Image (cartoon, grey):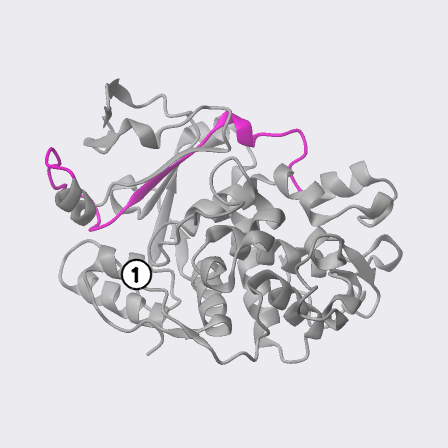
Amino acid sequence: MKYLDRICAILSLLSLSGLGLSLGPYNGGFTYWIDQSCYDKAPDFDLFMNEVFYEARSASNRLRDPSDIDFATVFWATFKVPVQDTTRWDLGYEARRLWGRGEDYSRTAYETVVQGMECLAHDWTRTRDIRRANVQLWCDNGDRYRKHGARSWDPVNQVWIDTRHVTAPASHACQDYNDGNQVNAETNPHFTRRPDRPAWFYDITLCDGMWEELRNIDDILHASGNNDLTRFGMGIGKIEWFFPHLTIMHEFFHVLPWAFMDPQGPGLGAGRLNGWAHAMATTTEQALSDPEPYTMLALWAALADLPPAAEEGARSRGGYTIARDWSLFPDTLKWRDGNPGVDGRMVAYRDITGVRALR
């Protein structure tokens, strides 16, 4: 059984054991809850969630399609190995720590990414009962917390958290934290188990820094002029910051069943590189357990689905992707500054490979 399928099966068994979790492979077993504060900031907040799941679905579909050579090239650029690479990577440390299991989670880069995208695309449904939610989404800048020095009290979930997890409202995501019973019981001596909550749950706070003037690809197209993303040599790094759904997707990859971490290292870490530049600075091993490369890959999938201005219409086969000649660069130069892949330059092709996903 593959890694994420195994996690799904484990959670399904936990549900049968009466622990409040409902899950089966790809049947909407994980749940998320949205606070009213998010609709106060963005009445169309549901569109952001829909975009998260659509882009994950498009990415997994394109990776599954052996005819989609263009997207296979994007995968290669993002994760530093081609889809055919058979090297197996053991990426289960964080999940093993959280689950307390010592199983071998090694698999290829391609398997890792496809399974990660498919779980996000198919296994999440919204709940209106906060008590059943595995992920809670807030947009209140963390105002609900009552700070007491190094700790803060969450009156909603009735747990203490480390105040260091709450950052400035200017950030895109002020805070993401695992409030789950198991983790807090292990790490927080002040924690009291909540029998009315799932065995694990996270709350994610999206802050004022996330609400930029431009919110979606249509806005970017209008700003670029003539509905052309290639105008002025625009690269993916010029547009990624404006999409709230990318922040949401990044934060989702921090939670179980992925438990991906932001890696530290040269050029990485908070406040240094973001988005595509961050993805380009990671090694394969770092990228496979880092939310940002997955988020960027999903955005590339959406761009591949977007017809260029001259090709608009349901029958269009056009879309945007990395320059095809990038694959011809020798491996010693593929990830050097100045080439079209590292720069994230978007090129429009009328014959882009693969099949466009429907929103």
Left or right of 19, for residue 57:
right
| As drawn, 168 above or below 340 | above
> What residue lies at 64% left-to-right and 63% top-to-bottom?
77
Q: Quadrant of the N terminus?
A: bottom left
> What residue lies at 49% left-to-right and 63% top-to-bottom?
117
Query: Which quadrant of the view contains residue 191?
Result: top left
> What residue lies at 71% left-to-right and 71% top-to-bottom?
330
Residue 143 image offset from top left, x and y in percent:
36, 21
Q: What amino acid type should be assigned to the residue bearing mark 1?
A: Tyr
The main secondary structure of the magenta stretch is: loop
Residue 215 image offset from top left, x and y in percent:
64, 37
* Residue 248 visible from this viewpoint: yes
Residue 159 image offset from top left, x and y in percent:
19, 33
Residue 103 image offset from top left, x and y in percent:
24, 72
* Residue 42 visible from this viewpoint: no
Q: Which residues are magenta?
A: 188-216
Residue 189 inside the magenta-drawn segment: yes
> What residue lies at 29% left-to-right and 40% top-to-bottom?
130
| As drawn, 261 above or below 12 | above
| As drawn, 274 above or below 359 | above
Circle 1 sits on which residue?
93
Query: Which quadrant of the view contains residue 245?
Result: top right
Left or right of 84, for residue 68:
right
Badge 1: few (under 14), some or many (20 or more) residues near its Cα, within 10 Å? some
Left or right of 322, for residue 94:
left
| As drawn, 21 above or below 5 | above
Left or right of 255, for residue 246:
right
Q: Quadrant of the C terminus?
A: bottom right
